[in-house]
């Protein structure tokens, strides 16, 4: 008679991907002109560009991060993760 062992994977949980969607979306909506959402996602160059755009356009460039924030929050968790965290897509 053969003894079967239970699956031992229960003790080694798979690491869960960190999804920054909600925080990045809120940052984009509230502090988008400062590029905080870009810095939060690790896009330093894009964050600096966002600050410069906001200064040059006297704040009118703040519409870009507002739209980005909405796009972040509308995407599914997996789609956001794959696009902005794995794929490193810096804009829209």
Image (cartoon, rainbow, N blue to C red):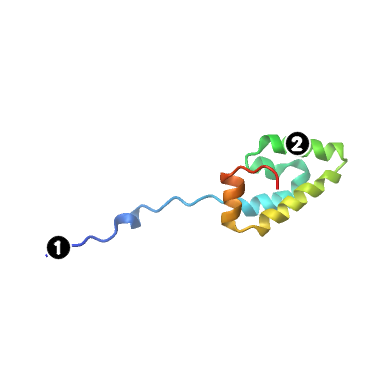
Please tell me which residue is depicted at 39% across the width and 53% down the height of the picture: 13
Mark 1, residue position: 2
Mark 2, residue position: 49
Percent coordinates x, y for residue 34 in the rendering: 76, 41
Q: Residue furthest bottom?
A: 1
Judge whether 35 appears above or below 17 on screen.
Answer: above
Q: Quadrant of residue 4?
A: bottom left
Judge whether 39 appears above or below 68 on screen.
Answer: above
Left or right of 15, for residue 24: right
Percent coordinates x, y for residue 68 in the rendering: 72, 50
Q: Earlier in the sequence, mark 1 or mark 2?
A: 1
Please tell me which residue is depicted at 61% across the width and 48% down the height of the picture: 83
Q: Quadrant of residue 51?
A: top right
Percent coordinates x, y for residue 8 in the rendering: 29, 56
Label 1 crowd bin: few (<14), some (14–19), many (20+), radius 10 Å:
few
Which quadrant is home to the N terminus? bottom left
């Amino acid at each position: 008679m053969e003894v079967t062992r239970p699956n031992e994977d229960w003790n080694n949980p798979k690491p869960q991907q960190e999804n920054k969607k909600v925080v990045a979306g809120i940052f984009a909506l509230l502090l988008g002109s400062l590029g905080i959402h870009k810095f939060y996602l690790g896009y330093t160059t894009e964050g600096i560009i966002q600050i410069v755009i906001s200064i040059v356009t006297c704040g009118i460039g703040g519409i870009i991060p507002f739209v980005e924030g909405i796009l972040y929050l509308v995407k599914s968790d997996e789609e956001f993760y794959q696009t902005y965290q794995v794929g490193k897509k810096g804009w829209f």
